[in-house]
Amino acid sequence: MLAALIAIGLSGCLSVGGTNEFNVYGLNLDTPKPGGAAVTWQLLVDVPTAADPVSSQRIVLKPGDRAYGVFEKARWTDRAPELFQALLLEGFEDSGRVIGVGRMSSSVGGDLALIGELRAFEAEFPDQGQAYAHIVFSAKLVHYSSSRVLTARVFEQRVPSEGRDLPSVVAAFERGVNVMVPEVVDWSLTAGNANWQAAYPQPR
C-alpha cells in the first residue's frame, strides 16, 4: 500500500490519483462506566489545539522517516481535534458522574475547564514490521473564571495494528481512544473534585 503512495514533505501528504472520492471513518466509544463519586460542579471541554498535519480531517500516517503523510481518499468524520473533543464529551456524559458538561462554545456554565493539546493522532508506519496508532493528549484542568491551572497530565496510547491496511489502523485508533478517554474522564473528575472540595469545603 505504501508503495502506491508518494511522500511529499514534512507537512505534505502521500497521494496519487485525481478523484475527489474518499471514505469517511469514525471512532466508537464502547467502554464500561468508570467508577467514582459524582461531582457537583460543571465542566467545559475545549477543542484541543493541534499542529499541522494533526489538526486536519485527514488520517495522518508517519513513515519510518520524519516526514508526515496521509492515507489517500480517507477522512475522519471531523477534524481530529473536534473528533477527540466529541469522544471526551461522550465519555464524561456516559460516566454518570457529571451532569453539567458541555463544549466551551455551548451555553453550559462552567466551573472548571479541560483544555489541552492533541500532540499526536497518527498512524506510525515503519518501513517494515507492525504499524501503530499513536495518540498523545496533553491535558490541563483549569479554574474557568480565573484560568488558573489546577493540575496537568500527559496521556499516551501507542496501540499495535493487526495489519497495515487502513481498516486495521482505524481499529487500532478505536482501541486507543477506548483506553485513553476513560483515563482522562476519571483523572479530570477525581482531580477536579479534590481541588473543588479543598476550595469549597462542605459544611459539617
Image (cartoon, rainbow, N blue to C red):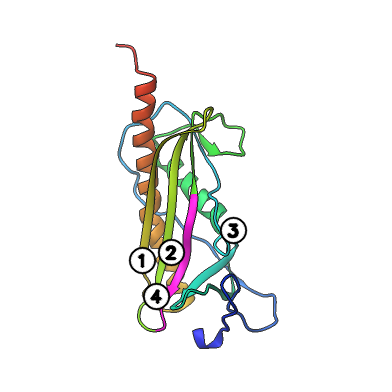
Say whether marks 2 and 3 touch (CB < 8 Å): no
User: Going by the image, does 175 lie left or right of 47?
Assistant: left
- Label 2 to label 3: alpha-carbon separation: 15 Å
Q: In which quarter of the image is residue 191?
A: top left
- The image quadrant that residue 200 belongs to is top left
The local crowd at label 4, few if under 14, some if 14 to 19, many if 20 or more residues have their Cα within 10 Å, is many
The answer to whether 111 is drawn above or below residue 57 in the figure is above
Label 1 residue SS: strand
Tell me the residue that label 4 is attached to.
131
Amino acid at pointer 3: Arg
Which of the two discs, 1 and 2, labels the residue nearer the N terminus?
Answer: 1
Q: Which of the marked residues, 2 or 3, is nearer the chain's N terminus?
A: 3
Q: Quadrant of the C terminus?
A: top left
Q: Say the numbered circle drawn on residue 173.
A: 2
Is residue 171 shown above or below 33? below
Asked whether residue 174 is drawn in magenta, I would say no
- Please tell me whether mark 4 sits on a helix, a strand or a loop: loop
Residue under numbered circle 3: 79
For the magenta stretch, what is the residue range? 117-127
Foreground residue among 92 and 137: 137
